[in-house]
Amino acid sequence: MFTDPATACLRDGAAEPPGATARGRRRFGDACLANGNGAPRSSARQATQPFLRPGPDGAIHCQILLLPGFELNELAALAEIFATANRLLRRPCFAWRLASLDGGPVTAGGGLKIAVAEAAAGSEPAHHFILSAYDTVSEIQSTIGAWLCRRYAMGARIAAIGGAGRLLAEAGLLTERVCAIHWSFAASMQEGLQEILIEDRLFAIDDRIATCAGREATLDFALNLVADSVDERFARLLADSLNHARPREAGERQLSELDFTGQRGATAIAHTVAAMRRRMNEGEDLAGIAAQSGVSRRQLQRLFRRHLGMTPTQYFLKARLQRARHLLQFSTLSVTEIAIATGFASISHFTRRYTELYGRTPTAERGRTPRRSRAKGGFPTPTFDLAAA
C-alpha cells in the first residue's frame, strides 16, 4: 500500500479527518516531514549501515548493469560522482565496471550505443546498480529476475535506478520494503503489486536493497551514498565541484508542490504560498496570509490537505525550516540571526522544530558545511579514510 509519513511529524493540533483510511490519507506528496518517530525501516537502517561497503582492498567495488533503453543521465550521474570522488580523494576508492546481460554494447534511450566491460554474470562484485528503460519489457523481466534473486541471496547489495525499480518488484525483492519509484508509473505499479510500500521520495535504502526515482534524483542518491561511505562534508565538497548547489535528501518529494494546473483551488494555494514566502520572517501569522488567498481559512485548510497532504500551518513551518537550512549551509549568519530571519520567537523553539524535521540541531547542521572554513583558508585538502568509514 501507499504510505505517507508526512503529516506525522510537524503537528499543528489539527485532527485527522473522521473516517480517514491509510489509503485515503495518502498523497503522492510530501514525505520529508518524517522524523525518527514512526519512520520507515529504510530511514533507520540508512543511518547506521552504509549501503556501500569497502572490500578487503579498501575500495568499493560496483557493477553498473545497463539494460536496453536506459537513461544516459543516470549513468552519467553515477560515473561522475564516483570519478570526481576518486579525484578529490586522490586515490581509487570507488571502482566500477559497466556490464550488460550478454557483454555486448547496449543502446541507451537516446539511441547511443555504450560499450561495456563484461557480462552481468562475468563477475560477482559486492554492489550492483541496475539501469533500465522506464517501459521495461517482459522478456528482460524474465531474464534478469532469477539472476537478481541469486545475487541478493549471495549477499550482494542491489540498487535499482528509475525504470529498474519495476524489475526488482517483479523479482519479489521489494516485498514489504519502502521504495522510491518514478512518479510516472508509481500508481500502476502499486495497483499490480500491493505488497510493496511506495512513497513519494527521491530514493530509499532498506538494508541491502536501494531504489531511486531516477533521472535527476540519481545525482542526489549517489551523493548520499558517498556521504554515508566517506563523510557528509566531503559529499558537500563533491556537490560543489559539480555545481550541484543543493543536494536533496531521500524523503523530498518528486513533483513540484505547486503543479496544480487545471485543478480546483490552484490559484488560492499559489497565492497563499507566495504570501508565505514574502512574510517568512513574520512567524506563524496565518490569519493575515490566508486573507490574501481569496478563500476562507477553512476552505484553505481543505485545499492544502487535499493537494499537499498537510495543513497551511504545517506547510508554512516546513517552508521556514527549509529556508533556515539553506541559510545555515550557505550563509555566514549566526544561528540566532537565522532563527529571527525565519520567524522564530526563540532559539529553543527553532532548535526543537529544526531537529524534528532534519534529525539534527541547527548548530550541527552548520558544522556539516565546509563553506565557512573554506572562506578563511581556501579549498581544504580531503583527508578522509574510506577504509575506516
Image (tube, rainbow, N blue to C red):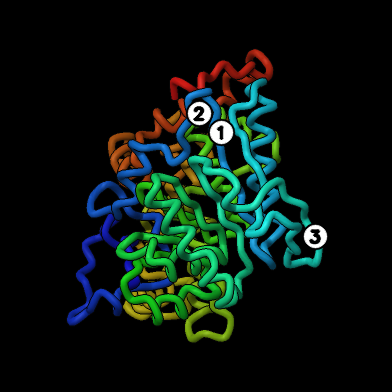
Give me the residue at 30% from left, 49% from top. 35
Q: Report if the CB atoms under discs 3 and 2 are less than 8 Å apart.
A: no
Residue 14 relative to residue 223: left or right:
left
Residue designated by label 3: 113
Locate residue 68: give its quadrant.
bottom right
Query: Would you call the spot at circle 2 few (<14 residues within 10 Å), some (14-19), or many (20 or more)?
Result: many
Q: Secondary structure at mark 3?
A: strand
Give me the C-alpha separation between circle 1 and circle 2: 8 Å
Locate residue 4: give its quadrant.
bottom left
What residue type is disc 1 on? Ala
Q: Report if the CB atoms under discs 1 and 2 are less than 8 Å apart.
A: yes
Q: Is residue 68 above or below residue 82?
A: below
Front-most of 44 and 370? 44
Residue designated by label 2: 230
Give me the residue at 49% from left, 69% from top. 166
Locate residue 298: give its quadrant.
bottom left
Give me the residue at 64% from left, 39% from top. 81
